[in-house]
Image (tube, rainbow, N blue to C red):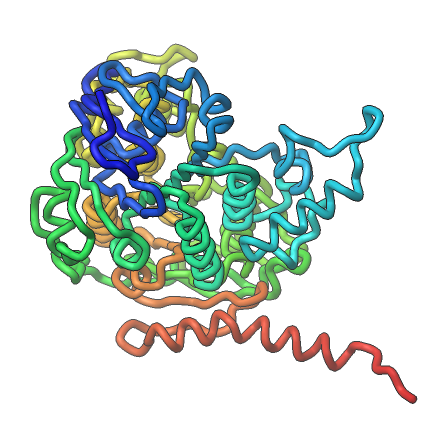
């Protein structure tokens, strides 16, 4: 086997991987120095498996790889990183109980005489963080205190430290603000100029058009296209990915908007959520927009009882009746479900089967006298596998073997088995491909036709504008404005997202002491 191009940094030939069934088949691909290769496809197409093989996390069943013209057979992620092949995964590789600085340099902490040099560590961390726009964060902050978006930027910064020849970015902008995305693109351009080869995995086709020179499309584990990016428009790429045409508009079906099902009044917690009030009606999708750190996830956690509010109430039904919610158990008892943004850490038991995960929230339906009926458990799981189009070999397949999008479907499927009147969705399509997104949109429409009240948090404004009846915009913890369908514009939504910070900064400037001569 030999490199197919004189400036090839990495080549794979005949790469395949089989778990319970083949997930990759006979992949041939060459990565050139200084190029961005876009890698896309539906969930379950094999993108993450291929990138993990290159990054040393997964051993291929068949095939060979070359790195800089030499046989490349990494036995671990560490071995790959020592050669300069780095991977930023959707599942963050950070330790929440350590500081940002310690996470950045965990494998190479500066020390003298056996003691960590805190001054040197802090200085190096500030420099690394500045590259990805994290200047405003104290490097001594615990990673667990940061939101998912900022954690993702820390993970990116960690992988840019030291020599890097190949950088794999798996859905790097899924939780980033527009400003952070631009900083990431600037960093990608600088890496290209240094000759770094980048594999950019994303479902956001407009991003791929901006940063990539070539595109590789996977479908059902097979490579169906490796072409210059300029040869395809978004519609053609979607057709390659899913094998069918998808419309640009979403028909949510005929729905009847009923009486208020959820009423939030004056909800507050610290400086994260400040006096937020709104209501959501039966059969309605209420979107919540805002920048990272605006308080969106924190608001959903308060409604769900995962955090306790300093003040305010959550009421259900019409007429509204205040619910005493002090824990998620209370919330579920009152008919409220939360589909979390962190499916790995909070939504799934990765070492358990699909059946076990879906059964978690539905034990009364499949058990008697404390014993689980295995047949009922499998039937329940199969019902959701069929309804959600979860790509799997059987209900017994481990959730850890599924793609990110199919894992998300398992989380959603668990709650669909319960008769919850209010469903809170936090980034429901994060890391999910175009085809699966439309499947989930259709599912949300079906839930509203059943009279459910839906609250959807999303970083994708176009997604909210596509599916929501109303959109409330959070900014610096406050609900700034609520827009009705057909009255909003993207510019107005963005302006509202910044408004709270501008007002807060203006108040801080007024309160700041002034020097006088």
46 relative to 506, above or below: above
Where residue 353 sits, quadrant-wise, is top left
Left or right: where 200 falls relative to 349 = left
**Horizontal and vertical percent for residue 508?**
72, 75
Name the residue located 73 percent from the left edge and 45 percent from the top edge.
Answer: 122
Left or right: where 376 falls relative to 296 = left
**Horizontal and vertical percent for residue 427?**
39, 49
Left or right: where 219 falls relative to 54 = left
In front here: 465 or 434? 434
224 relative to 451, above or below: above
**Horizontal and vertical percent for residue 493?**
40, 72
Left or right: where 389 falls relative to 138 = left
In front here: 180 or 4? 4
Name the residue located 29 percent from the left edge and 36 percent from the top edge.
Answer: 8
Name the residue located 38 percent from the left edge and 73 percent from the top edge.
Answer: 483
368 relative to 143, above or below: above
Residue that extends furthest to the left in the rendered view of this protein: 244
244 relative to 115, above or below: below
In front here: 132 or 456? 132
Asked whether residue 359 appears in the rendered view, the answer is no
């Amino acid at each position: 086997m030999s490199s197919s191009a004189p400036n090839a940094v990495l080549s794979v030939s005949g790469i395949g991987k089989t778990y319970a069934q083949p997930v990759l088949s006979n992949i041939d691909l060459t990565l050139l120095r200084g190029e961005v290769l876009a890698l896309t496809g539906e969930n379950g197409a094999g993108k993450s498996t291929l990138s993990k093989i290159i990054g040393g996390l997964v051993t291929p069943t068949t095939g060979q790889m070359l790195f800089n013209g030499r046989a490349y057979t990494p036995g671990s992620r560490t071995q790959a990183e020592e050669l300069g092949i780095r991977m930023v995964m959707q599942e963050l590789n950070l330790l929440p109980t350590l500081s940002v600085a310690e996470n950045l340099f965990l494998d190479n902490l500066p020390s003298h005489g056996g003691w960590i040099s805190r001054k040197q560590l802090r200085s190096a961390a500030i420099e690394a963080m500045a590259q990805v726009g994290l200047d405003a964060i104290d490097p001594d902050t615990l990673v667990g205190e940061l939101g998912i978006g900022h954690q993702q930027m820390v993970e990116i910064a960690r992988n840019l430290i030291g020599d890097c020849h190949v950088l794999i970015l798996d859905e790097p902008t899924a939780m980033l603000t527009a400003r952070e995305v631009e900083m990431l693109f600037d960093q990608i351009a600088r890496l290209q100029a240094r000759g770094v080869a980048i594999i950019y995995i994303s479902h956001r086709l407009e991003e791929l058009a901006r940063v990539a020179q070539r595109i590789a499309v996977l479908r059902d584990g097979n490579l169906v296209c490796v072409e210059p990016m300029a040869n395809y428009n978004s519609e053609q790429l979607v057709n390659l990915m899913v094998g069918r045409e998808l419309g640009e508009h979403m028909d949510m079906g005929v729905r009847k908007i009923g009486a208020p099902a959820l009423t939030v009044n004056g909800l507050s917690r610290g400086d994260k959520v400040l006096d937020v009030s709104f209501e959501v009606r039966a059969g309605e999708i209420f979107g919540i927009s805002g920048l990272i750190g605006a308080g969106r996830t924190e608001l959903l956690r308060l409604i769900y009882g995962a955090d306790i509010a300093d003040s305010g109430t959550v009421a259900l039904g019409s007429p509204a009746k205040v619910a005493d919610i002090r824990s998620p158990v209370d919330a579920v008892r009152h008919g409220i479900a939360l589909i979390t943004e962190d499916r790995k850490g909070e939504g799934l038991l990765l070492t358990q089967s699909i059946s076990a995960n879906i059964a978690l929230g539905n034990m009364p339906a499949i058990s008697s006298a404390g014993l689980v009926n295995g047949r009922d458990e499998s039937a329940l799981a199969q019902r959701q596998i069929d309804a959600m189009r979860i790509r799997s070999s059987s209900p017994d397949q481990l959730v850890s073997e599924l793609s990110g999008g199919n894992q998300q479907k398992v989380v959603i499927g668990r709650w669909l088995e319960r008769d919850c009147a209010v469903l809170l969705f936090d980034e429901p399509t994060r890391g999910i491909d175009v085809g699966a997104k439309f499947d989930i949109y259709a599912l949300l429409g079906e839930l509203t036709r059943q009279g459910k009240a839906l609250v959807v948090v999303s970083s994708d404004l176009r997604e909210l504008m596509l599916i929501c009846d109303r959109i409330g915009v959070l900014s610096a913890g406050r609900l700034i404005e609520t827009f009705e369908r057909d009255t909003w514009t993207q510019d107005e939504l963005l302006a509202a997202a910044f408004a709270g910070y501008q007002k807060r900064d203006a108040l801080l400037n007024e309160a700041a002491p002034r020097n006088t001569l």
